[in-house]
Every structure is written in C-alpha cells, then in structure tokens.
Image (cartoon, rainbow, N blue to C red):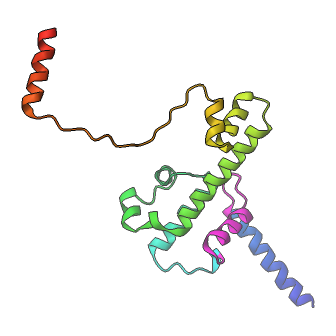
Amino acid sequence: MWITNGVKKKKQQKLKKKQQKLKTKGVQVHVLQEAKKQYTGVHFQKLKMASKKDTYEKEILEIIIKFKLFIIKDIFAYYTKLKSAQFYNLGLEKSECILKAIDDNKVKTCHSQKKKWFESENPTLQIALYKLNCSEGEREKISINYNKNDNTNINSTELTSKEIIEINKALESEF
C-alpha cells in the first residue's frame, strides 16, 4: 500500500510541476484543459501531433481561449509562428475547433454585455437592450428616427446617349 501511495505522490508532484510550467499570465491550466476538452472532444494531452497543422491548430486554440479573441485576423497579433497566408493555405480558417472557440467568445461576451445592460441603472443602456429584444412595431414606436427599407426595385428606363446630352445642355444653360 505504501508503494502505490509513493507512486501516486510522484505522479502528483510531476503533474504539479507541469502545471506550474504551463501557467501563463494568470490563465489557470485546468481552465485551458477543460476548454481544450470542450473544443476537441478528447483530452488534448492524448492527441498525437500528426502534423504541423495540428500543432498550429492547438496553439492557436490556446491563444483564442487565453485572449478571448473574436476575429480570425486578431490571431496573428498574438501568434507569430504562422503568417496569415500560411494560416489560410493550411485551411485553419475552416477548423471547427477554432471557429467554435471564436463563436463561443462572441456569445459569452454578448451575453455578459446584455447582462450588464440589464443590471445597469443607465436608461440609455436599458433602451438599447430593449431595442435588441423588442418587436419591429415596438422599436418603431420608441425610435425618434425610424427608417423602413422595403427593398423594392423600381423599373426605370435607361437613358440614351442623346437624352443624356440634352439633359447636360439644359443644365449648362441654367448655370
């Protein structure tokens, strides 16, 4: 029994050392590990690095999670191992993991923003939140300026070159 406890302690010590090495600027390792499981569907540590693409994808995913990025272009400000052209050549912009992480950041931020607006005492924020949630009729009633776009096509005849010349002459004669 004491042998297995010793082995467990050694494993726990190794795990703690790994966690201490992996800590980066306030981001806890267990949060990253949970996020990695969520976006990849399997344990990140058990995945084999089959290619550079997989390596890049994993590192980019960590950056998206760590810095809460919303746009693919923002990745290149934090991840310098890969140029944008290489990123697109590898097809990483289509990666489900990367797209899901970016979408999750957008949804979480949007939700937390709406929650702040709801809890705020600022009437402007509350009206903005109401406009996001109300019907078109309600929005029209509370808006000072309301522009309705019907997107209807107007059939108009095209002007011939003679008509354009006549219109230009008429305008010139007025001035």
How far across and down, in percent of the image, does residue 37 sit? 67, 72
Determine if the magenta segment contains residue 27.
yes
How far across and down, in percent of the image, does residue 165 sit? 8, 25
Residue 100 can be seen, yes or no = yes
Q: Is residue 173 above or below residue 15?
A: above
Residue 115 versus residue 26: which sits nearer the camera? 115
Left or right of 92 in this view: 156 = left
Specify the segment rendered in magenta.
22-43
How far across and down, in percent of the image, does residue 98 sit? 54, 64
Location of residue 82 (image quadrant): bottom left
- The quadrant of the rendering that contains the N terminus is bottom right
Residue 63 can be seen, yes or no = no
Residue 108 versus residue 166: which sits nearer the camera? 166
Which residue corresponds to the image point at 35% horizontal and 59% vertical from the top-left?
85
Q: Farthest residue to the right: give it.
A: 1
Location of residue 22 (image quadrant): bottom right
Q: Is residue 42 above or below residue 18?
A: below
Which residue corresponds to the image point at 80% horizontal and 38% vertical from the top-left?
119
How far across and down, in percent of the image, does residue 91 sit? 41, 68
Determine if the magenta segment contains residue 56.
no
Residue 141 versus residue 99: which sits nearer the camera? 141
Q: Farthest residue to the left: give it.
A: 162
- The quadrant of the rendering that contains the C terminus is top left
Which residue corresponds to the image point at 39% horizontal and 43% vertical from the top-left?
152
Q: Is residue 8 above or below residue 111?
A: below
